[in-house]
């Protein structure tokens, strides 16, 4: 939007600090506008998908899950990592919806993309809107383990979910963004949604 010339930040050197299955930590020496370089440590993340599942009654699916880094249960959307090489993001989203909420979706659109915490991580989260919901048959449901074994799955009116966001009862970033975007999308008759294969932001 701005016509100003932006400085090109280049990596002069990179050091791998730590590497794991979901994320790694790197330390970059980055060229600065005033000359010289500065060190920036950050987390490189595989990325994630999340799903606002909206039913015909105007309710959304929320899950309550324990998150150890914050030491408590949070209200969230069905979500998961983009950790399967080459997997289509919409396919990943519907897989997570089935695994965490026992639901399938007849229609999936891109709702919103977000950098969850760009001050220290490159994680990108794509949030989909899923509609035309149906129950997964009991014999085909996912066997939930670890923290997922403790999941609570509820349906809440979208307006009530937005109230929970504004009241500080929902603080998970993709959940906040997804619910507010879903409310806006509903106001505009879902006319501004992107196709499932739309490219991620770069």
Image (cartoon, rainbow, N blue to C red):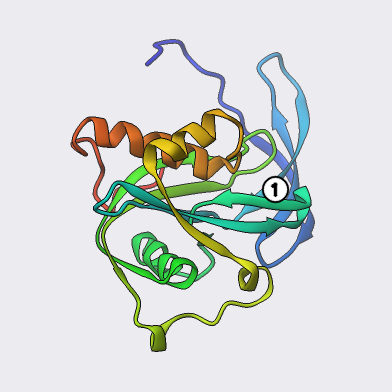
Please say whether residue 202 is visible from this viewpoint: no
Residue 195: image x %, image y %? 24, 49
Depth check: give the residue in front, 1 or 146.
Answer: 146
Residue 70: image x %, image y %? 76, 48
Residue at disc 1, secondary structure: strand
Q: Is residue 188 left or right of residue 103?
A: left
Please say whether residue 42 is visible from this viewpoint: yes
Q: Is residue 136 left or right of residue 115?
A: left
Q: Is residue 144 left or right of residue 154?
A: right
> Which residue is at 29% across, 54% downward?
55
Quadrant where the N terminus is found in the figure? top left
Residue 177: image x %, image y %? 47, 37
> Which residue is at 65% across, 43% downward?
121
Give the image quarter of residue 17.
bottom right
Quadrant where the C terminus is found in the figure? top left
Tag 1 residue: 43
Local packing at callout 1 (Cα closer than 10 Å; few below 14, some 14-19, many 20+) is many
> Which residue is at 51% across, 18% downward?
6
Give the image quarter of residue 101.
bottom left
- Taking the view exactly as shown, the residue that stands out farthest to the bottom is 139
In this rendering, the answer to whether 80 lies above or below 118 is below
Residue 85: image x %, image y %? 48, 70
In this rendering, the answer to whether 25 lies above or below 184 is below
Depth check: give the residue in front, 112 or 16.
Answer: 112
């Amino acid at each position: 939007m701005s016509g100003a010339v932006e400085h090109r930040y280049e990596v002069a050197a990179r050091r791998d600090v730590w590497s794991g299955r979901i994320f790694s930590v790197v330390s970059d020496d980055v060229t600065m506008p005033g000359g010289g370089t500065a060190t920036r440590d950050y987390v490189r993340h595989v990325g994630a998908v999340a799903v606002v599942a909206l039913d015909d009654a105007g309710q959304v699916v929320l899950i309550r899950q324990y998150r150890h880094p914050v030491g408590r249960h949070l209200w969230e959307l069905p979500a998961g990592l983009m950790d399967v090489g080459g997997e289509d993001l919409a396919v990943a989203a519907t897989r997570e919806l089935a695994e965490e909420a026992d639901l399938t979706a007849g229609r999936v659109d891109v709702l919103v993309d977000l950098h969850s915490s760009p001050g220290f991580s490159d994680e990108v989260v794509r949030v989909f809107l899923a509609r035309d919901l149906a129950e997964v048959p009991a014999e085909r449901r996912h066997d939930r383990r670890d923290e997922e074994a403790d999941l609570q799955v509820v349906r809440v009116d979208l307006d009530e979910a937005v109230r929970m966001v504004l009241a500080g009862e929902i603080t998970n970033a993709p959940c906040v963004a997804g619910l507010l975007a879903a409310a806006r999308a509903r106001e505009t008759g879902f006319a501004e949604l992107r196709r499932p294969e739309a490219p991620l932001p770069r």
